[in-house]
Image: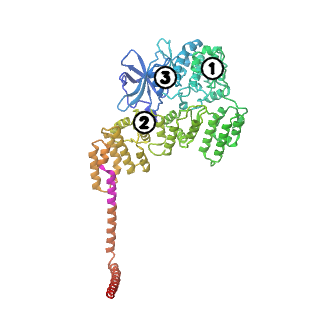
Amino acid sequence: MSLAEKMDMPPESVPAGSGGMLEGRFRIDLSRPVDFLQGGVNMAVQAADMQDPSQERFAVVSTPYSSYRRQIAQLMMESRIPGMIDLLARGTVRFSETDVRYVSVFDLPRGGRLFTDSEGAIAENLVLDYVLPPVSAALLTLHRAGLTHRAIRADNLFFADAERSQVIVGEAITTAPGSLQPDVYEPQESASAHPYGRGDGTPADDIYAVGILMLHLLTGRLPGADMSADEIYRGKLGQGTFALLAEDLDLSSRISDVLAGLLHDDPKRRWNVETLINWRDAIKESPRRGRGDRRAFSKILFDGEEYNSPRLLAHEMTKRPKSAVELLQSGRLEKWVRNSLRDEDASKEISHIQSSSAGAPRGQKRNGTTAVTQATRLLDPDGPLWYRNVSFTRGAIGNLMLQAYQLDDTEMKKSIAELFESGLLLTMAVSEIRENKEKRAEWMSESAISNCFDYMKRSRDLGYGLERCLYELNPVTPCLSPLVLGSHVKNVPDFLTIAEKKLVSANGQGNPFDRHAAAFIASKSKGLDKYLKTLSYHAPGSVPHTLVQLKLFAKLQAVAHPAPLPGFAAWAEEMLKPVFAKIRSRLRREVISQRFKEAKKSGNLETILTATDIERQIAADSREYENALATATQADQMAAFLANGTEHRRAAANHYGAWITSVLSVTSLITSMVLSALYFMG
């Protein structure tokens, strides 16, 4: 079982009937799940309202890896959204000393789910008169606020009351947008993205989902249930959604017209929520049916199959990148884009990509993958960005990274890291931002991409790399360090508090500065660059590396947690044991160890560092050792000289005697000359 899987379960047993409290009002009972509300990686459980016990509530307990849509949650807390389930409270709940989780409390839909596949179809008039109005009302409020729901589907509709007379839309804040949607519910712009890379999308995506929802309810089965995701996508591009899923069904003319407006393949021609609310007026003029992707004037042969849909060609190129590179380098793609799609700008860019990739060393796989990524962006500028085994829409890479870490998917993390460190994402995003004629949403902010590009330059250093990007792009994600995972650590004071408890219980055994901890602390703190930079110069386990870590946590303690930290003091002792062992002077080692024991009682890392004065003591010990070594060497040389015998001493005496005689002779000569000179001069 992976660490992420373990964290999906309570780390400590919770007695039945007990639980943590949220805002002093809602008691969260982890032992009582609400089965019909389960979905995704989070857990739905019963919640008791201590202020009004007659009301029924439920809570969604988020995992540390969950994406949380703060803007929608904030809107729901400020005012009730008509037609949507009510959010009553949200925040952290403590179930034990170190078991802390983020919880959202909602009003319980007493009538259960509106629909299950086993119950069969719902009548047309019920769908139009009882389902569409609350769905439309909820979307109207969200869309006017510039937000999307992205969880409109059959199993997310409920009866608010026990009499089953009022339909409401379920929540959309505790999971990544679009991540739980069946593939058929997604429009062409996001259908080929990873489920956790679908993103917030646009209001048109919600409208499209309403159309699929109507088909689902009216037929009693998931549209396209007998097709694979790839077959559905190809069919939508080739025929159009309406033609693929609705045209052959026995539907009334008004339902057909409503579906045509909701499922138009071009988002610009698709109905908006205001038109949906006034659908009776809108169908007076029968809406045009969408017919899939745009068509080129002629087809292009790729890997044995002909294509005239640029979006479908891009999709197939990502599935067979080697063949895509060959197509690109042949020059046929550039000619087809210029002559059949009549897109001069795109053809020039493809020509540039072709020239760049042709000049790369043979067998350089990353360069070929980059070329395919750039080419497919030009063929499908509104679709997901593909790179190796990842695919995501605008603004969704943060959610995808969380999923990669939850699954501990090494290949996915590697691909995302390459996107950042190669500068490919930065180049593409900056180019789009500066030439954004279509006013598309950004992949990421220019500053965020630039920062991540810089972080990846130091990917091997603590506090940088992909982990730093993860926390910068997901600012509400708690620290995922194994030491504090499951305690919903959201800032440095929280980190020190929880890490202290873990270190105390483990008698100092643990690592409060692994890659996740370092990246999290760096993203939440200022003024740590000098420490991180110094760490990068020294190998882990070396004396300088150890001392810099202690200094860093001493600073954090002073700023964020001035109280004693005996757990960190015990950790410091474990860290310093190898350092003390390197002190050669037994007396010095004993003195420093005694000073440490006294300072350790304070629980203050700065006090420990000051009292032990490790750096100066090690430097002095090193000098003393070198001096002692030099003295010992001289003594050895003298002993060897004395032991060499009389012959050597006689030879030495003769040598030095001759030297002294010559010196005396020269001195006498000079003296005689000086006296003679003085005599004649005077």
Q: Which residue is mark 2?
A: 479
Quarter assignment of residue 51:
top left
| Residue in front for this viewpoint, 156 or 372 | 372
Residue type at mark 2? Cys
Vertical position of residue 48 compared to residue 574: above or below: above
Residue 338, x across and y down, in percent? 70, 37
| Residue in front for this viewpoint, 140 or 206 | 140
Residue 600, x across and y down, in percent? 29, 44
Q: Relative to residue 448, is residue 631 drawn left or right?
A: left
Give me the C-alpha separation between circle 2 and circle 1.
Answer: 45 Å
Q: Residues within 10 Å of mark 1 (few under 14, many from 20)?
A: many
Q: Which residue is mark 1?
A: 261
Q: Residue at image x 40%, y 43%?
A: 528
Give the secondary structure at mark 1: helix
What secondary structure is the stretch in magenta mostly built from?
Answer: helix
| Residue in front for this viewpoint, 71 or 328 | 71
Residue 171's label in the rendered image is: 3
Task: Answer with mark 3 or mark 1, whichever residue precedes in sequence.
Answer: 3
Task: Answer with mark 2 or mark 1, whichever residue precedes in sequence.
Answer: 1
Give the secondary structure at mark 2: loop
| Residue 424 lies within the magenta run | no
Vertical position of residue 233 compared to residue 330: above or below: above
Vertical position of residue 635 compared to residue 377: above or below: below
